[in-house]
Amino acid sequence: MNRIKDQLLPFERITREPGHHFFGYYDIQPFSGDGRFHLCNRVPFMDRLQDGNDRAELGMVRLHDGTFVPLAETYAWNFQQGTMLRWHPAKPNEEIIYNTRLQGTYKAVVKNIVTGEQRVLSRAVANVDPTGRWGLSVNFSRMFDFRPGYGYAGLPDPFLNIAAPADDGIFLVNIATGESKLILSLDAMRQLFPDAPETKMKLMVNHINFNTDGTRFLFLLRNMAMPATTQPKVAWKTATLTANTDGSDIHIMNGFGGASHYIWRDPEHVLIYADIGLKGKLELYLVRDRTPEAQAIDPVFFTHDGHCSYSPDLNYILYDSYPDAAGYRKLILYDVRKRKGETLATLFSSRWDALPNVDIRCDLHPRWNRDGSAISFDSVHEGHRHIYCMDVSSLVSG
């Protein structure tokens, strides 16, 4: 079988066996500030979900020779987003931030990789603002019950049988002191939609991200079934909301409907795949926060959901696809100015119906380096989970 098709540019694998390597999500910067290292997670398997006894090794790959440098270990991880491993935005060559399980709770660790010193934050973080001052935390146990590929195994949700608890929701974490506080409860979110049938069910927060200056954040509010064995599985719907860093000035960008991957382009605009437009059709839109403005981005080209991110100069959109009927995924680059996209490579993954559990899939999750000259992505086209890098400078220069 030809596992690579339509290859426009060469790319290289930066991780080595044994072990399966991946970074995780598309909206976190994996490259160090000086561009010498790429963060990664390493686990011994790829064919089943993680459980509470499975440990992930965290490290960084030295890009000039492929050496894996171990940094830490954790039991708080998943295949889609890893352990939220990232460089500290204010110290991108010296400190990393990742989630861990300690003393019966999920917490985050800030570790200096030069001195080895570390401090523990009061809660695990789902996102860190671009200045490195604040983190946002959600209930990762509740997330695991909803989508195991995005939550952590090992600790039960204390609010398991509560549809919209007043003591759980979105927490703001001070990265410097480690202190945290609840800024927006699930109960408060429920009250924003008094007539929506989804809010009569169990609610949870999925993807959450700060904007590009840390003044606001966006999150997806989704419904799920209560854990009663007689209740049928519920198809979730998604409400899209934004708020100030302290949880104030809440804006409902889109009521309960369809919404998926997104990225902030700047402090006011969000690129999102949703049914947010007047036609009520799932498309890729550029939306202005706190306004009804929503512009479809080339609906002829963007016909499917994908993991989206802007190049540092905002001239290009990096995108990917889910597997087609034959199990192939596309890696895509779109020129915003020319309104033209092209496929960088088509890589074999697996058909979803061939997986024992869809949450162990390996999405490409393509990510830019810091100057926009290269990208990295995760893939299993060689039969092993690895991280790859591609130089795209010949396409984005000028």
Image (tube, rainbow, N blue to C red):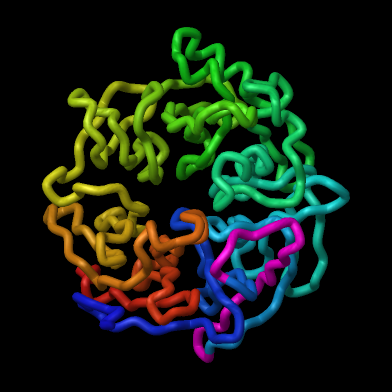
Q: Which residue is depicted at the point 60% across and 85% down?
A: 18
Q: Is residue 238 left or right of residue 78?
A: left
Q: Quadrant of the N terminus?
A: bottom left
Q: Which residue is depicted at the point 74% across and 43% down?
A: 123
Q: Position of residue 11 (x, y in %)?
A: 34, 81
Q: Position of residue 149 (x, y in %)?
A: 55, 52
Q: Is 50 in the magenta? A: yes
In magenta, the rendered stretch is 46-65
Residue closest to the eye, 29 or 43:
43
Q: Which residue is depicted at the point 55% across and 56% down?
A: 81
Q: Does residue 133 lie above or below 190 as drawn?
A: below
Q: Position of residue 263 (x, y in %)?
A: 39, 46
Q: Does residue 325 lie above or below 224 as drawn?
A: below
Q: Is residue 395 left or right of residue 134?
A: left
Q: Is 204 in the magenta? A: no
Residue closest to the eye, 335 or 192:
192
Quarter of the figure with residue 205: top right
Q: Is there any visible trace of residue 131 in the rendered image?
A: no
